[in-house]
């Protein structure tokens, strides 16, 4: 399965492009840059970025969504370019890198590099979303401005997960990691999530997503005993290969009745087990939609390649 649509809203703001009617307030929208030619030269992306900056004024955009920057299947996102213009992005609070459909570039083909310089150059950045993990790197650090971190991948490398866990994120409220499959680099096991599930470096965390995982049953069992769960309002284990074994572990673990929402959609639970999860968590909004049928070759995540 694949991603076949672009976002229409980001960070609570409607997304507009340079081709749209200019908004009355450039700071009240999220600006989207997307190269129509998937092999566009970097100079074309830089020119589009310049147009956004010109339209938004001295503080730049509040939110920026980047789709295709040009040959993303072999060229890394130009972090250095963003860092070079950091002074002109003083108003930037939300950034999404890689909002591409599978027709533009499969999620596991999207190339990245070290995103640490972005977090260092934009200390006021509150939301960072990254799609794709080919070449993705992160160095542990203290990032007090960050409130939401979403890493979407067909296979999230263990060093990136360890870097997230080792970072000091005192104000992070929302963490979403698409763990993916081993075939595309998702080499973490449940025990590797222990520092995150302990919650010490993320004292403000209330929304945890460990999604799109081929080891969803294993992750569910680890989550069932995780200290961080007691202070969550939302738990997301969707998009992966969760089955009856993982659901049973969740129900047998610590109480989950304090949650506002438990998202398990796209799963391999039997109808009976899915209904049991709903019945045993009264007052919790439980999403057990999109039940899948295990094929002869096994289960599958929403995104892999």
Image: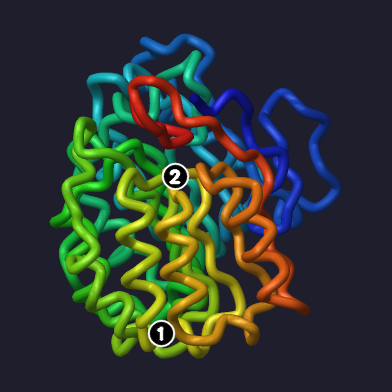
- Residue drawn at x 19%, y 75% is 166
- Nearer to us in this view, 215 or 36: 215
- Nearer to us in this view, 235 or 29: 235
Which residue is farthest front?
272
Residue 208 horizontal side relative to residue 158, left or right? right
**Whole-percent x, y for residue 247 in the image:** 49, 62
**Which numbered disc covers residue 268?**
none
User: Crowdedness of circle 2 by 10 Å Cα count: few (<14), some, many (20+)?
Assistant: many
**Whole-percent x, y for residue 290 in the image:** 65, 39
**Whole-percent x, y for residue 105 in the image:** 41, 20
The residue wearing badge 1 is 228
Quadrant for residue 45, please give it: top left
- Of the numbered discs 1 and 2, the one sitting upstream in the chain is 1
- Nearer to us in this view, 44 or 184: 184
- Residue drawn at x 68%, y 75% is 281
Question: Taking 66 as reference, is 265 above or below it?
Answer: below
User: Crowdedness of circle 1 by 10 Å Cα count: few (<14), some, many (20+)?
Assistant: some
């Amino acid at each position: 399965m694949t991603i076949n649509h672009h976002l229409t809203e980001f960070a609570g703001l409607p997304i507009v492009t340079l081709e749209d009617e200019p908004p009355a307030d450039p700071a009240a929208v999220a600006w989207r840059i997307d190269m129509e030619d998937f092999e566009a030269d970097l100079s074309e992306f830089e020119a589009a970025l310049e147009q956004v900056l010109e339209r938004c004024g001295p503080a730049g955009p509040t939110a920026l969504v980047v789709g295709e920057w040009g040959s993303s299947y072999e060229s890394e996102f130009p972090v250095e370019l963003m860092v070079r213009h950091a002074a002109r992005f003083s108003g930037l609070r939300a950034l999404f890198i890689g909002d591409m459909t599978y027709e533009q570039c499969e999620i596991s083909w999207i190339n990245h590099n070290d995103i640490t310089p972005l977090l260092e150059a934009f200390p006021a950045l509150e939301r960072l979303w990254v799609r794709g993990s080919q070449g993705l790197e992160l160095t542990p650090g203290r990032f007090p401005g960050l409130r939401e971190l979403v890493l979407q991948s067909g296979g999230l490398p263990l060093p990136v997960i360890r870097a997230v866990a080792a970072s000091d994120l005192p104000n992070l409220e929302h963490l979403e990691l698409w763990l993916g499959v081993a075939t595309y680099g998702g080499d973490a096991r449940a025990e590797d999530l222990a520092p995150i599930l302990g919650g010490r470096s993320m004292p403000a965390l209330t929304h945890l997503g460990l999604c799109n995982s081929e080891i969803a049953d294993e992750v569910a069992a680890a989550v069932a005993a995780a200290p961080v769960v007691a202070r969550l309002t939302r738990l997301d284990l969707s998009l992966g290969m969760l089955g009856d074994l993982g659901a049973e572990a969740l129900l047998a673990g610590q109480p989950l009745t304090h949650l506002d929402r438990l998202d398990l959609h796209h799963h391999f639970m039997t109808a009976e087990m899915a209904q049991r999860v709903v019945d045993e968590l009264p007052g919790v909004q439980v999403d057990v939609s999109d039940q899948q049928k295990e094929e002869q070759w096994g289960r599958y995540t929403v995104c892999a390649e």
